[in-house]
Amino acid sequence: MRHLHWFSLLLVSMAFASVIGESEENPSEELEEEHEAHYAILYPWFVQALGIFVFYLSTRLAKLIPFPYTAIMFLLGTLMGIGYEVSGDVKEDQLSISIGMWENINSEVLLLTFLPGLIFYDAFSLNVHLFQKSCVQTLIMAFPMVLMGTMLIGLVAYYIFPYGWSLNLAITFGAILSATDPVAVNALLSEVGAPERLKMHISGESLLNDGSAIVFFGIFSDLFLKELGVDGLGDEVTFTEGVIKFVTMAFGGAGIGIAFGLGLVSLLFILNKKLLPDENIVQVASTVTVAYLCYYVADSVLHTSGVLAVVFCGVTTKALGTSLINDMELMNNFWELVEHLLNTLLFAIGGTVWGTIISNVHPREFTGTDWGYLILLYILATVIRFGLVFLFYPLIARIGLKSSVNEAVFISYGGLRGAVGIALAVYLDNIVHRNTDDELSEFRMETTKLFGMTGGIAFLTLFINGSTAGAVLNYLGLTKQSEAYEMISEAHYDTLKMKLLDGFIHYLSYPLFDNIDFGIVQRYVPYMADFDLETLEKAVLKNKRGIPPEDYQAPNLDSVLQQLMKSENDKDVDLSWYYNLREPNNKKMHGLSLIGEGFNEEGFEALQAEHNEKPETKEYRLVFLEVLRATYARYVELGYLNRHGFVFYSLEQGLDFAADAANEGKPLRDWEASHIVNQP
């Protein structure tokens, strides 16, 4: 059984090897055309199979493979793209034909397929209270900062690159690289337990950042495409028209998203009969349907920002519709699956297309000079990112959730380029190739080079920034737990050990467990490996005092004592307590005295002020709130609270407000906070 998983992996590898090498002998052209269409299904699922291997190896060999999952998928896609190009013009095996189909995927279909699924769940997963509080901060980082980043990177491309790009294409390139995509860093933040505030900064900025970058991309790419001279392609936009278009696309997209979000909440309300399990599935299906329709209507029908529409649709649904969802676990599991599949495929596609460019197969060439400019671009883009974050730091450090210097450093370092930038670059390159005939067209060469640079930046940030983000977090002290938290953790650990020992002693009172081997128990239960006779004595006597004499059954400790005596140097150990276990327990249990005597409000406020000064108070309050949250969830399961009711919604919101207050060193007052949602 130990090697069964390796045998399974071998079988899967052999199956895929047979598919890759399979080709019919002397197939006729008609038969090839007939069967070629369905080959398209092979590439995405071959990529998902690779993703399973990558995930397995990266989780089992984390020290040997310190790179993010998405970075490895991008690299594998790159290798597939290079292999596809260097294998020659004749593609006979099914996988190569399938790669060729996806390498030339329609750009509009690419964006419509991937972006709604990737964006909706990220927006739906946001903490609404923190999002509201950090809204001004994220708007500053997502609009003025993105615009300045777009212009600065565009100027770098226009004045430093030797490619002769027009200013419109250079600024379009700047907009593409301004779209940060911290998917890998977000996963890392959750893994290392980074502060919730830092997660909010990065994820909130990323969502709005993507939306604003796509708006800027739409404006400047229209100006560039107009240069092709193709009727109906591109648009001449003046400065005033550009501002109007930006406002229309941004605020129009947000408004459409809110409208679709309200519609989705209405659907969830209609489909909230818990006694019909099928409605749970239909609820999940409705979120997918609305997310994709929202993007399509906003982007393709009304020509606003589809990304911002989906963001606000997700946030609206989270704020108003969470209590209407029958099976939240099903909802989360489904969307996590969708996000994993789409990220795996999108990064592989991006790597594949980039691999075809850097393979240096004519006419696509990516020379050593281009690699040099790519390294220079990576350095300058990083400097620009740091410069812009710290330019706005005096403002974002004082408003909303606020930011520390160390957090600002990590926000700057964690600005990865990935999924959205790759999709936009593929989108632009495909449009130009579709509307030009000459393979050596100047415009084709320019957009191909642009995608080469975009893919290179994605590659470098994923592998360099993504793989070192954990070390940077630790160096900046953003994952370091406070002494109070460590103290609480140690106390909790000791409590768990004692509860475990209490349960163990209780079971030893049953004849069924008379002949256990305590050595085996210690081997397989690490918590019990360091118990000694003194700890055992305290636990046994405590257990005896907690049980009425008429119900008490003395545990059989022979095996336990025999094992523990082996580690005792002094053989003359006093075991009188063990031999006296069967004597009646005459000690009465004393309850705790009530502290309410003489209680007054002034005394309570003084006590509260005293505890506010203690460093561990904040941690105790946060732990208490999580216990309270779990209790509310338990009451929902028992039927004491209605998940769909306003009471539960108010209590949940109260916990969010109270947690925010606790982080700032203020009293909890979660009951008062739960009434905030009643206010207009």
Image: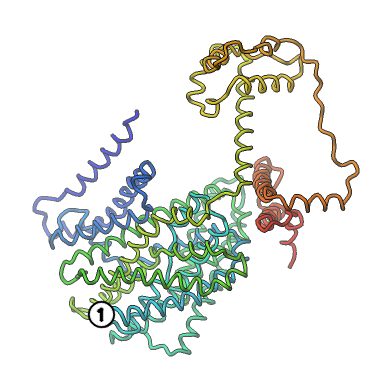
Query: Would you place residue 28 above or below residue 398 in this image?
Result: above
**Residue 342 visible in the current orientation:** no
Label 1: element kind: loop
Q: Nearer the viewer, residue 238 or 255?
A: 238
Residue lying at 34% horizontally and 44% vertically, measured from the top left: 57
Label 1 amino acid?
Pro
Q: How many marks?
A: 1
Query: Would you place residue 288 above or below residue 543 in this image?
Result: below
**Residue 577 visible in the current orientation:** yes
**Residue 191 location, x and y as percent?**
48, 49
**Residue 274 location, x and y as percent?**
61, 47
Residue lying at 41% horizontally and 88% vertically, measured from the top left: 237
Q: Residue furthest left?
A: 26
**Residue 380 location, x and y as percent?**
37, 72
Quadrant housing residue 677: bottom right
Q: Which of 361 and 645 is in front in this view?
A: 361
How dense is the environment of label 1, judged by Cα within 10 Å: few (below 14), some, or many (20 and up)? few
Left/right of residue 94 with respect to residue 346 in the rendered view = left
Left/right of residue 617 with respect to residue 126 in the rendered view = right
Quadrant housing residue 498: top right
Quadrant of the rendering where the C terminus is positioned: bottom right
**Residue 582 location, x and y as percent?**
71, 10
Q: Which residue lies furthest to the right in this view?
A: 598
Quadrant of the rendering where the N terminus is positioned: top left
Residue lying at 62% horizontally and 70% vertically, measured from the top left: 398
The residue singled out by tag 1 in the image is 162
Quadrant housing residue 640: top right
Q: Which of 602 and 241 is in front in this view?
A: 602
